[in-house]
Amino acid sequence: MKLDRLYPLSHSPIEFHFRQTPSDFVVTEVPLYPFSGYGEHLILKIRKKGLTTWQMLEILSAHIGTKVRDIGYAGLKDKDAMTIQHISINKKHEKALENFSHEQIKILETTYHDNKLRIGHLKGNRFFIRLKKVSPTDAKKIDSLLEWIEKNGMPNYFGWQRFGKEGDNFETARQIIDGKLKMRNRKKRDFLISAYQSHLFNLWLCKRIEISRLFAGLAPKELQKVFVWGDEIIKTIHKEPHFFKLLPGDIVEHYPHGKLFTVDNLHEEAKRFQARDISPTGLLSGEKATHATGLAWEIEKDFVEEVPARGSRRYAWIWPKEIEGSYKKEEWHYELHFTLPKGSYATVMLEMIANRKIQTG
C-alpha cells in the first residue's frame, strides 16, 4: 500500500510479512534510572502478553486489593506483543504477591525504590521484531537501510496506532473542536484531542521532509526557482551536512533531552545537529506552546490550529541505538533489535525500511 507520508529515502517498496504477535514483537522497557534497592515502593519487573498495560494493572490490583491508581508505571505497552515493563506498588502488598499466578503475566524480578513510578520515568524501549517472507535480495537492502539509519537517524512520526483502528480518530477530534460533537467522557475526549495534535505534527513533518528531499536532489540554482528565500539562505541550507535541513527560526532541543532554543546561527547549529547534540522539534498545537520564528514559522504556521489542550514540542528527528539485523536464510526471516527513545514508534522505523504502509495482521 502507498504511504500517505514521506520518508527520506525513495527506494522501491520492500515486501515482507509482519504481524504483531508475542513471538514476533517484543518490547522491553529501558528505565530512566537504576532503582535504589530500598524504600517504600516495591518495583516489579513484569512480562506480559496479550494484555494492555491497563488490563494487567487491573488484574494485579484485584489480586492485592488496591486501586489501579495506586500502582505506578512509566509507560503504556502494546497488547499484541510480549512486553517487559516495571511497575511500583507499596511494599505492604509484597506478601499478597507471593501466591500470584497468571498465564499472561509473569513477575521476573523485584526490588525496591524510594518513589512511585510515574508516566515518563523511562529512557526508551528496546525492540525485537521478526519479519517474515524476506527474500535474500530484500535482506541485503534492509542491511543497507539499517546502515543509513544508524548513521543518519529517522523522522519521529507518530505511528498508526495513535490514530485508532481506522486511522481517522483525529477527524472525530476535529468535530469536537468545531463544536459539532459533544463528548462527556473527559479521558476519551482528551485522548482524541491529543491524536489531533499528533495528526498536525505528522503533516508538518511530512512537509519538512518534502523540503529536505528537494534540497537533497537539486542544486542551489534549481532550488532558487522553487523557493523565494534568497540565494544566500538557499546556499547555506544546501550546505548543511544532515539530510533533514534546519531552517532559520527553527525550535531545536538538546538531545536526547534538554532545553528548547531558537536557531539563529544556521551554520553552527547544523553542525551540532549532525553531531547529535541537538535535534529540531515540531509543534504539538495548543495553549502556551513555543512557536518557531522567521522562515521556519512560514512553514509551521500552516499546521497550527487552536486546540483546547496544552501545547508542546516534539523531536522531529531521532537516532535509534544499538541496531542489530540478522537474516535467517533458511526461514526467510529477518530479525531486528533496536532501541528507541520514549514516545517513538517501532512501526515508523519499519515503514521507513519498507517505504510502504505496514500491515500488522
Image (cartoon, rainbow, N blue to C red):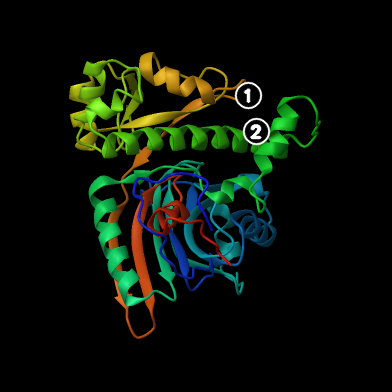
Where 116 sits versus 227, above or below? below
Find numbered disc 2 in the image and state the secondary structure of the residue it sits on: helix
Give the residue type at disc 1.
Val
Q: Where is residue 121 in the image (x, y as percent from the top left)?
A: 44, 43
Bin the neighbour count of mark 1 within 10 Å (Cα to Cα): few under 14, some 14-19, many 20 and up: some
Q: Where is residue 60 in the image (x, y as percent from the top left)?
A: 63, 60
Quadrant in which residue 114 is drawn: top left
Where 343 sits versus 51, above or below? above
Quadrant in which residue 205 is drawn: top left
Q: Position of residue 237 (x, y in %)?
A: 25, 26
Q: Do the residues labelled 2 and 1 touch (CB within 8 Å)?
A: yes
Question: Going by the image, does 271 lie left or right of 154?
Answer: left
Q: Name the residue under label 2.
A: 193
Which is more N-terminal, label 1 or label 2? Answer: 2
Find numbered disc 1 in the image and state the secondary structure of the residue it sits on: loop
For the residue pair 256 and 278, the one nearer the viewer reads as: 278
Q: Where is residue 226 in the image (x, y as percent from the top left)?
A: 36, 26
Give the residue type at disc 2.
Ile
Question: Going by the image, does 180 lie left or right of 348?
Answer: right
Estimate the spatial distance between the alpha carbons at disc 2 and disc 1, rounded to whole Å.
Answer: 7 Å
Q: Quadrant of the N terminus?
A: bottom right
Residue 307's disc number = 1
